[in-house]
Amino acid sequence: MFPVLNFGIGIVTVMLSDQGKMTVGLGAALLALVTFGAGFALWKSGSPVPKGLGLGLMIGWALTSILTVGFCTGLNPTMYT
């Protein structure tokens, strides 16, 4: 689920990146906010399936950040210089 979300927000961010480096930062912040906001909300629900989806979103963000050295989640500082 996270790769689909990441791909969608990433495409929009790349399309708007001609407007400046701030757009990349806003895209990264939006991705983290959606991921952890939705992940936490799903995790706090009582049912096991939404709990798993919520944890999966948050773990997916962390693994994507580690495996892509922050390029896919906007954490790499070279994207802003």
Image (spheres, rainbow, N blue to C red):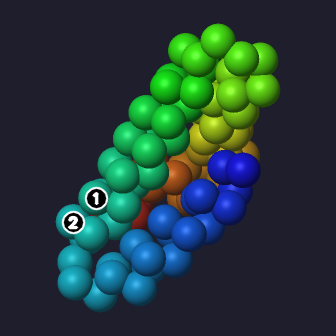
- From the image, state whether disc 1 or disc 2 is nearer to you: 1
Residue named by callout 2? 22
Q: Quadrant of residue 37?
A: top left
Residue named by callout 1? 26
Percent coordinates x, y for residue 33 in the rendering: 38, 41
Quarter of the image with the C terminus in it: bottom left
Percent coordinates x, y for residue 11 in the rendering: 52, 77
Circle 1: residue type: Leu
Circle 2: residue type: Met
* Whether residue 68 can be seen here: yes
Closer to the camera in the image, 74 or 49: 49
Query: Residue visible at 27% across and 69% down?
Result: 23
Crowdedness near tag 2: few (<14), some (14–19) or many (≥20) residues, C-alpha within 10 Å = few
Tell me the element at label 1: helix
Rendered view: 73 above or below 36: below
Crowdedness near tag 1: few (<14), some (14–19) or many (≥20) residues, C-alpha within 10 Å = few
Query: Residue visible at 28% across and 58% down?
Result: 26
Q: Tell me the tag on residue 4.
A: none
Q: Residues at badges 1 and 2 in contact (C-beta under 8 Å)?
A: yes
Query: Residue visible at 51% across and 24% down?
Result: 40
Q: CA distance from mark 1 to mark 2?
A: 6 Å
Q: Is residue 15 left or right of residue 50?
A: left
Tell me the element at label 2: helix
* Whether residue 59 can be seen here: no
Q: Is residue 38 left or right of residue 18?
A: right
| Number of residue marks | 2
Percent coordinates x, y for residue 30 in the rendering: 36, 52
Q: Is residue 80 left or right of residue 31?
A: left
Query: Residue visible at 44% across and 44% down?
Result: 34
Percent coordinates x, y for residue 60 in the rendering: 69, 39
